[in-house]
Image (cartoon, rainbow, N blue to C red):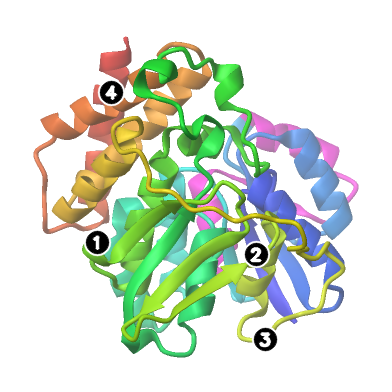
């Protein structure tokens, strides 16, 4: 039996991870659940899965949860120290990193240094600290198993012949504004941006999908996960979200992984690897389906092109782009900036940053903090 700590258990990926645990009886056990401040949902999860530990980032939320769970022998911890303790516990085999944003970097590193397997659903961890995270994982011989549907697809297609790959092809749904011009995008409202056509996701990743920054972050993530040059990473718009990604080999053969738009499938594979568990989830039915692929419009969605440029430059710049984007998206969600203003803020912060190349965790966090302050100033 595999014992898990789930970081971000009340978010979209966290909830679906727990659904996998519930469906796959006898294979998975929960040691700890971690969330920010969703007390009511965390109480429900704690009562259903009976972990040894639950952790709330927010101090007041932790205090309230202690009162709610006082009838159960569950330890309620708080803050980053509590999160770190939950991932390095000797009982834990695998850490599911589903916290949203750069906040996942520190506990992911701590888990790797403690020898835990990582089921990675937090792409910002590799965007901000890819060199550090991957070098630490290699040193500790810890597997990093991708949970993002695109990276899971690539991982599955690479299993047989990773040394003969010529190109990886990340598919993108195109979000709610596929086919829109830059001029039309000036009219985007928050309500429209939150309506993704295919996937049920959290607010931040849904907005990133709408701007295509999410795909840009995934390009950087793929660079680190699969040790691929940026010139060998291609993005294609695939509105149906059936082909989750593809790998082209040097002989011209292309392998693709297909599935329903259901995040439980890549979550389960990351937790079951290298085996495949049977489940009762709905199966893909291709009858009557038409699959199409298109070039991304870099003019209408410049975030994707920016991510390629930032990734190629490297150093602390990806961490800065990611941090500025988190602040700008939060401002958009609170209706403080426009949809197009998200990119303008992130681009300006990146242009102002003085990039450092020899990075440790401290320099990454410093760059992240600077970018957040600068983006906040620009919004103000």
Q: Give percent across and percent down for residue 1.
A: 75, 82
**Residue 267 marker:** 2
Disc on the earlier residue, 3 or 1: 1
**Quarter of the figure with residue 305:** top left
> Which residue corresponds to the image point at 28% horizontal and 29% vertical from the top-left?
346
**Residue 316 marker:** none
Q: Tell me the residue that label 1 is attached to.
A: 230
Residue 183 falls left or right of residue 92: left
| Residue 375 painted magenta | no
Specify the quadrant that holds the C terminus: top left
Q: Check disc 4: other Cα within 10 Å, few if <14, some if 14-19, many if 20+.
A: many
> Which residue corresponds to the image point at 56% horizontal and 32% vertical from the top-left?
176
Note whether residue 143 is visible: no
Q: Secondary structure at mark 2?
A: helix
Asked if the residues shown at circle 3 and circle 2 are in contact, with their CB atoms under 8 angstroms apart, the answer is no
- Between the C-alphas of marks 3 and 4, the distance is 44 Å
> Which residue corresponds to the image point at 83% horizontal and 59% vertical from the top-left?
50
Q: Tell me the residue that label 4 is attached to.
A: 345
| Residue 84 painted magenta | yes
């Amino acid at each position: 039996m595999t014992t898990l700590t789930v970081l971000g258990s009340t978010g979209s990926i966290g909830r679906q991870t727990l659904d996998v645990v519930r469906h796959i009886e006898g294979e998975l056990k929960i040691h700890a659940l971690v969330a920010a401040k969703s007390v009511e949902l965390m109480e429900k999860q704690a009562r259903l899965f009976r972990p040894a530990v639950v952790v709330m980032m927010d101090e007041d939320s932790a205090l309230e949860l202690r009162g709610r769970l006082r009838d159960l022998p569950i330890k309620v911890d708080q803050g980053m120290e509590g999160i770190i303790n939950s991932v390095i516990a000797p009982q834990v085999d695998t850490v599911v990193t589903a916290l949203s944003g750069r906040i996942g970097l520190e506990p992911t590193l701590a888990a790797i240094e403690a020898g835990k397997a990582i089921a990675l659903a937090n792409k910002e961890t590799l965007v901000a600290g890819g060199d550090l995270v991957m070098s630490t994982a290699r040193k500790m011989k810890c597997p990093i198993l991708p949970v993002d549907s695109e990276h899971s697809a690539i991982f599955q297609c690479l299993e047989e012949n990773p040394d003969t790959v010529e190109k990886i092809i990340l598919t993108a749904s195109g979000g709610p504004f596929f086919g829109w011009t830059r001029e039309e995008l000036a009219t985007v409202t928050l309500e429209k941006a939150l309506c993704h056509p295919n996937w049920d996701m959290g607010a931040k990743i849904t907005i990133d999908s709408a701007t295509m920054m999410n795909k840009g972050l995934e390009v950087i993530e793929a660079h680190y996960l699969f040790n691929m040059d940026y010139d060998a990473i291609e993005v294609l718009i695939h509105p149906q979200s059936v082909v989750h990604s593809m790998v082209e080999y040097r002989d011209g053969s292309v392998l693709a992984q297909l599935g329903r738009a259901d995040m439980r499938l890549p979550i389960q594979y990351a937790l079951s690897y290298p085996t495949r568990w049977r489940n009762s989830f709905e199966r893909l039915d291709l009858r009557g389906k038409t699959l199409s692929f298109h070039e991304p419009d870099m003019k209408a969605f410049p975030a994707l092109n920016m991510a390629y440029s930032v990734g190629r430059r490297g150093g602390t710049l990806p961490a800065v782009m990611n941090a500025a984007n988190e602040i700008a998206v939060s401002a958009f969600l609170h209706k403080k900036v426009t949809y197009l203003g998200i990119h303008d803020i992130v681009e300006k912060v990146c242009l102002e940053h003085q990039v450092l190349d020899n990075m440790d965790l401290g320099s990454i966090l410093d760059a992240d903090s600077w970018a957040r302050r600068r983006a906040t100033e620009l919004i103000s």
